[in-house]
Image (tube, helix red, strand yellow):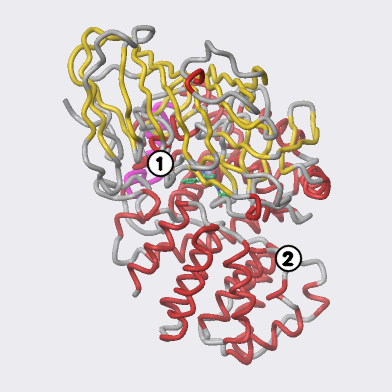
Amino acid sequence: MAPIDPHSFTDSSDPPTSHIALTLYLDFPSSTINATALFTLHTPHTGPFSLDTRGLTIHSVHTPQTQTQAPIPFTLSPPHPISGSHLTLTLSNHTSFLITYTTSPSSSALQWLLPPQTFAKSHPFVYTQCQAIHARSVFPCQDTPAVRIRYSALLNIPSHLSAVMAARHVDRRPPRNDDVATALWCSQGRVVEEFLMDQPVPPYLFAFAVGGLGNREVGPRTRVYAEDVPEVLDSAAAEFAGTEEMIREGERLFGPYEWERFDLLVLPPSFPYGGMENPRMVFLTPTVVKGDATGAQVVAHELAHSWTGNLITNKTNEHFWLNEGFTTYAERRIVEAVQGEQRATLNIGIGWRGLNEDVERFKDNLEFTKLKNNQEGIDPDDVYSQVPYEKGFQFLWRIERQVGRPAFDEFLKKYIDTFKFKSIDTETFIDFLKANIPDIENQIDLVLWTEGTGIPPDAYEPDSSSYKMIVSLANEFINGRMPREDEVADWQGQEWELYLDNLPKSIEASQIIALDSRYKLSESKDYEVKVSFLQRAISCGCKDYYNEVEKTLKGVGRMKYLRPLYTALVKGSGKEDDKVFAKRLFSEARECYHPIAQGVVEAIFAKHL
Ligand code: BES
Ligand code: ZN
C-alpha cells in the first residue's frame, strides 16, 4: 500500500482502471451534473480500492445491472485542500462497479456561464478544464497521469445546445429509457450526445464543452468550433487556416499523427489558459484570434502536445517538464518550419526573458527552479511557471547543439515511437538518452540540468540580429531614447512584447506615458502587448491607465493576464490604494473567472496582503 503520485489517492496495490462509461445529465439551473460512472478494472480486486474525488456527492456504489442487490460499501474522507476527498470502496473480487453521484456547483474543473457571460448572450455555456488535478471534480477516478483510461460518455443536454468532447462523436439522438440512469431524469426538450475515446489517455485530458456552438471547416481533419455567431466563426476560421500545414510539419518531424482529427474550440473569454491540448479537440482562448502569428503559435504548441504530452505523458506533475519542455521545443520546430527562423528565435527570446523572471520569482523557493521537483504537499496550480517550459526547452536545445540536428531529430522520433501511449518519468528519459547517445553524460551535465536549481551555465540566450536589436533598443530607453517609427514599422505583437519585457526596471511614469502617446500600446488589440504595458505602468506608479486595467481584468479570464496585473497591483507598487482597487476589481470580476483562476488570484492576495 503506497501512493504512486503526490497528488492522488491512487494506491500502488490497486489494479488500474481500464475503462469508464459515463452518463452525464447536465442541469444548467443548478450548475450540477447528475451522473453515473461504470468502471472496468484491468484485473479483479478484493479489499479497499481508492479513487480521487473533489466536491462529489456519492449516492451509491453497486455491482452493475444489480442495483437491487447488496451495494458495495464505501467511505468518503473529509476534503483535503489540495487533493480533495479520498473515496474508498470495499470490493469483493470485482472487475466492475457503478457509481451514482452528483457534482458540486463549485466543481473546480467546470465553469458554468449564464447567457450574458457569453458572446451571443442567448445560450448558457459550460466547459471543463481538468489539468492538472481537476478531473476528479467531474467524475471519480484514479486521477494521476500514471493511469491511462479509455472512456465513453453520454451527455444529456438541453436540445437547443450542442456538445463537443475530446473524443470521437458517435451520435446525437433523443434520450432512451435504457440509457443507464438517464431514465431517472426528465427527457423532455433534451438530447443525448454520445462520444467514445478508445485510445488510452490520462484523466487530465478528459474534456467537454456545451453551448450554442457552430463550426467551420478549415482543413481535411480540422474544423473550428465556437459560439454560433458568424463574425466569431469567420475570424476564427481565418486565423487557423494554416493548421493543416502545421500538422504535416508535425508528422514530418515527430512521426504519424495518431488522433485522427485535430479540431479546435474557441471558448468564451474567461477560459483560464491560452490553450489546452485536449486530444482531437484543442481548447483555445479567444484572445488568440487577432490576425497575426501568435494564434498559430498557440495552435503549434497544443498540436505539438499530440506527440509530447498526449502520446508520451509525464508520470506525475513532478515530471511536468517532460510534457511542457518537449512541447515548447516541438512547437518552435513547427513555427520555424512554417513561419521561419526569425519568428522562432523571437519566441526563444521571449521565453528566455520569462525563464529568467520566474527563476528570480522563485529565489526563496529554489525547488521550483528544478526541472524534476518535489511536489509533496504542493498544489500544481500554485507553482505553475515558465521553468518546465523554458528550462526544459533549453535542456533539449542544449542536447540538439551537442549532437547536431539530424541526430537529434532521429533520436526524438525514436523516443516518441518507443514510449507512445505510456506515462514516464525523468529517469526513464535520461536512461533512454544515455542508451541512444553514447557518452552524452560526459558532454552535458545531465544531473545539473534535471536536478539542479537555477539556469545552468550552458543555457543559451538566442543571438539573432532582430532579437538583439529589439533588446538593445529596450536598454537604450534608459536615456529616454524611444524607438523611431521606421524602426518599429514591421513590428508585430511579439516584437513589442519582447521590447516591453526588456525595458529597464527604473523607468518613470512620464516616460511610460510618452511611449504610449506615440505607440498606443495601452489600447493594443493584442493582449500580450496591452498587459505587458499595463503591468509596467502599474509598477512605476502611473495611474493614467487604471480604466484600461479595469476593463482588461473584467474582460478576460486568462491567467497569463490576471497573474501579472493583480500581482503588480498588490505587490509591485506597494501602495495601499492599489490594493483596495485590486480587491474591488476582484470582487466584481470573480464570478466571471473559471474556478482555477479564482483560486490563483486568491493565492496572490493571500501572499501579498
Ligand atoms: N497544458 C498547458 C496548459 C496547462 C498547464 C493547463 C498546466 C493546466 C495546468 C498548455 O499546453 C499550455 O502550455 N498552454 C499555454 C500555451 C502557450 C505555451 C503557447 C498557455 O496557456 O499559455
Ligand atoms: Zn503546453
Q: For the stretch drawn in magenta, what is the main secondary structure?
A: helix
Q: Judging from the image, what secondary structure is the residue with disc 1 in?
A: loop
Q: Residue at x 59, y 23 (%)?
A: 187
The answer to whether residue 50 is left or right of residue 289 is left
| On screen, residue 246 above or below 535 | above
Q: Residue at x 67, y 18 (%)?
A: 173
Q: Nearer the viewer, residue 272 or 315?
A: 272
Residue 160, image x and y in percent? 70, 34
The answer to whether residue 458 is left or right of residue 302 is left
Q: Judging from the image, what secondary structure is the residue with disc 2 in?
A: loop
Q: Does the magenta-highlighted stretch encompass residue 445?
A: yes
Quick one: label 1, few (<14), some, or many (20+) residues within 10 Å? some
User: Which quadrant does the N terminus fall into?
Assistant: top left
Q: Nearer the viewer, residue 553 or 425?
A: 553
Nearest to N terminus: mark 1 or mark 2: 1
Disc 1 from disc 2: Cα separation: 36 Å
Residue 542, image x and y in percent? 57, 87
Q: Mark 1 — residue?
A: 104
Q: Nearer the viewer, residue 381 or 34?
A: 34
Amino acid at dot 1: Ser
Q: CB atoms at circles 1 and 2 under 8 Å apart?
A: no
Q: Residue at x 40, y 38 (%)?
A: 137
Quadrant of res 343: bottom right
Quick one: label 2, few (<14), some, or many (20+) residues within 10 Å? few
The answer to whether residue 500 is left or right of residue 587 is right
Amino acid at dot 2: Lys
The residue stretch that appears in magenta: 429-450
Quadrant of res 561: bottom right
| On screen, residue 6 above or below 344 | above
| On screen, residue 398 above or below 170 | below
Q: Mark 2 — residue?
A: 525
